[in-house]
Amino acid sequence: MQTQLKQKGKLLDSKGSLSQVGWSPQPLLDCNLENARFYTFRMFQRFRIKRWDYYAIFTPRLFFSATIADLGYAGNIFVYMIDFSKIELHEEGLVIPFGRGIKLPRNSDQGISEFGDKRLQLHFEVVPEGRHIQVSWPAFQDGRGISADILLHQAPEHESMTIVIPIKQHRFYYNRKINCLPATGSLNYGDLHEDLLPETCLGSLDWGRGVWEYKSFWNWASASGYLPDGQTIGLNFGCGFGDLSAATENCLVLNGKVHKLAQVNFGYSSSNFMHPWKFTDSENRLNLDFTPLKERLAKTNLGVITSDVHQMFGRYSGTVITDDGRTININNLIGFAEEHQAHW
């Protein structure tokens, strides 16, 4: 059921269909969105193509995230931080009409993502050492201000979860998730200052490009952290979007190596997101409990565009079995799990 891609090539053929479908531990396909063919009048296609770079940083005390997204009809810039010592969430976002001024690269392994105006500056760049994240938002949270200058170190052999899947006819999702990138640099929010050390701080990237149905739904769960013996461990689970018969994005990432999982079940109550979640899989390799600590509720209503996200932050505990049969014990690993419903 899990088709692994092996050949480099183009994402879309001349007719706008996916050239390959499956997953890979490294990106192999050139994201040639100019070949998309899902409307008779191509001038309208740009309003349906979605592109984003979502970075997340896990430290012993904080979770920090910054995103640059172009959703076609509008751009979306948002930054948020959770202080785990106080269980406090601080967030602000901007809607940019038609994504004006947003720059996003063609592929996930090179280029610059940026947006800036008189209010804020976000700059993400792929550099030889890894990924450089710079954020400056002086008026964030009523003038407290937030800034970040972070380098996520990414070795060439570090594996990631890349999937290419169809969403009905001529629609598709091309996504890359990178977990457990050692982080150095600094983060400032008001009077709070945090120096990031690679022995305790890890970053991740959610890089997405594609064309969805107007009404969309998905679940996503992720974590990046350390085991007691110093090994890095990452989790990435997802479902609800597109045709997952060829491949899912479900995996364990241990010391930078992907261990592929098949179907993962998200067991949770949509009437009480703070209730414990349960994660199991179709091959009896995964048995995790997720205990939420804090809910991030993000709602957007722009008429034709609506979004409703319940992103739960909490701790994972349980077991997962690697590709070579080892049982990994997980205890109180900080991460998140979410439900997302959108009209976009």
Image (spheres, helix red, strand yellow):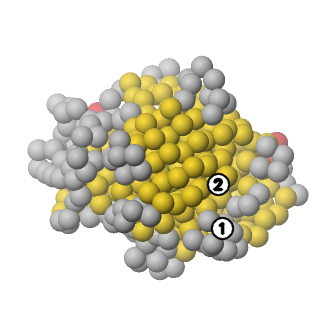
Q: In this view, does 326 lie above or below 300?
A: below
Frontmost residue, 110 versus 234: 234
The picture places residue 145, in percent across and down from the top left corner, at 79, 52
Question: Counting residues from the N terminus, which is met first, the one under dot 2 or under dot 1?
Answer: 1
Q: Which residue lies furthest to the bottom in this view?
A: 128
The picture places residue 162, in percent across and down from the top left corner, at 35, 56
Q: Which amino acid does label 1 sit on?
A: Pro
Q: Which amino acid does label 2 sit on?
A: Asn
Q: Name the residue under label 1.
A: 228
| 242 relative position to 98: left or right | left
Is mark 2 in CB contact (under 8 Å) with mark 1?
yes
Q: Name the residue under label 2.
A: 331
| 74 relative position to 117: left or right | left
| 193 relative position to 28: left or right | right
For mark 2, does the 10 Å Cα neighbourhood hold few (<14), some (14 to 19), or many (20 or more) residues?
Answer: some
Frontmost residue, 332 versus 152: 332
Q: Which residue: 35% across, 41% down? A: 282
